[in-house]
Image (cartoon, helix red, strand yellow):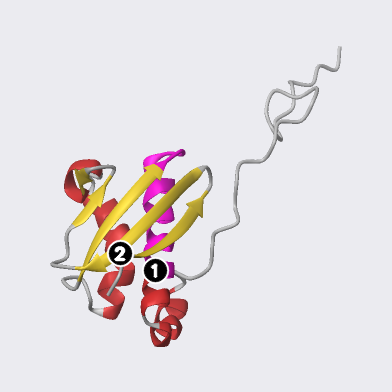
C-alpha cells in the first residue's frame, strides 16, 4: 500500500495527514502524539476513527498541523484521518458517518461588527 493523504479543517486549524501501513505510530509535526497532545482527551479525539474501525495498530500516521488552538487541531486531525481511512477502504464510511466523523464542523468565529466591542456585545446603554 502506498501513502494515502487527506486534509481536515476545524475553525482555523488545518491538518494534513499521511497514512501508510505500519505499527500504529502517530507523529504530529515530527513529535509523538503524547508529546504534542499531553491531554488524554485530545489523544482520544485523534484516535477515535481508528478505534471505531479497530485498526489502531495497522497504520502509521504522519500529521502536519498548523493554525488554531489545540482543540481545533485535534478535531481537524480526526477529520483528516477519517477521510484517509475512507480513501483506503470505502466500505468503512457508514460506520464512521454514524459516529459523526465524516462531517466537517462548519462553526467558526463570527466577525466583529463596526460600532460594537465584539461580534454581538453592545456598549453599556446610558439613559442619561
| Residue at 30% in and 76% down | 52
Q: Nearer the viewer, residue 89 or 38?
A: 89
Question: At which x and y percent is residue 87?
Answer: 42, 75
Q: Is residue 81 magenta?
A: yes
> In what quadrant of the picture does the N terminus appear?
bottom left
Q: Overall secondary structure of the magenta stretch?
A: helix
Q: Secondary structure at mark 1?
A: helix
Q: Residue furthest top?
A: 128
Q: Residue furthest bottom?
A: 91
> In what quadrant of the picture does the C terminus appear?
top right
**Location of residue 6 by image quarter:** bottom left
Q: Which mark is residue 111?
A: none
Q: Is residue 60 magenta?
A: no
Question: At which x and y percent is residue 111?
Answer: 69, 36
Q: Which residue is mark 2?
A: 19
**Location of residue 90 by image quarter:** bottom left
Q: Secondary structure at mark 2?
A: strand
Gap in angstroms between the C-alphas marked 2 and 1 = 7 Å
Q: Are marks 2 and 1 in contact (CB under 8 Å)?
A: yes
Q: Is residue 52 above or below residue 79?
A: below
| Residue at 41% in and 88% down | 91
Q: Is residue 36 above or below residue 10?
A: above
| Local crowd size for mark 1, using a 10 Å CA cut-off: few (<14), some (14–19), many (≥20) | many
Question: At which x and y percent is residue 97?
Answer: 47, 78
Magenta-colored span:
66-83
Q: Which mark is residue 84?
A: 1
Left or right of 89, for residue 8 = right
Q: Is residue 112 above or below residue 55?
A: above
| Residue at 23% in and 76% down | 55
Question: At which x and y percent is residue 57?
Answer: 16, 71
**Location of residue 59 by image quarter:** bottom left
Amino acid at each position: 500500500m502506498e501513502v494515502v493523504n487527506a486534509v481536515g479543517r476545524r475553525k482555523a486549524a488545518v491538518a494534513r495527514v499521511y497514512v501508510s501501513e505500519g505499527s500504529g505510530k502517530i507523529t504530529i509535526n515530527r513529535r509523538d502524539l503524547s508529546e504534542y497532545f499531553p491531554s488524554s482527551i485530545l489523544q482520544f479525539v485523534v484516535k477515535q476513527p481508528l478505534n471505531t474501525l479497530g485498526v489502531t495498530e495497522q497504520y502509521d500516521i504522519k500529521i502536519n498541523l498548523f493554525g488554531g488552538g489545540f482543540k481545533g487541531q485535534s478535531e481537524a486531525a480526526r477529520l483528516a484521518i477519517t477521510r484517509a481511512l475512507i480513501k483506503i477502504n470505502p466500505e468503512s464510511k457508514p460506520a464512521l458517518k454514524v459516529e459523526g466523523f465524516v462531517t466537517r464542523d462548519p462553526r467558526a468565529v463570527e466577525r466583529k461588527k463596526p460600532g460594537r466591542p465584539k461580534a454581538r456585545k453592545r456598549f453599556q446603554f446610558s439613559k442619561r
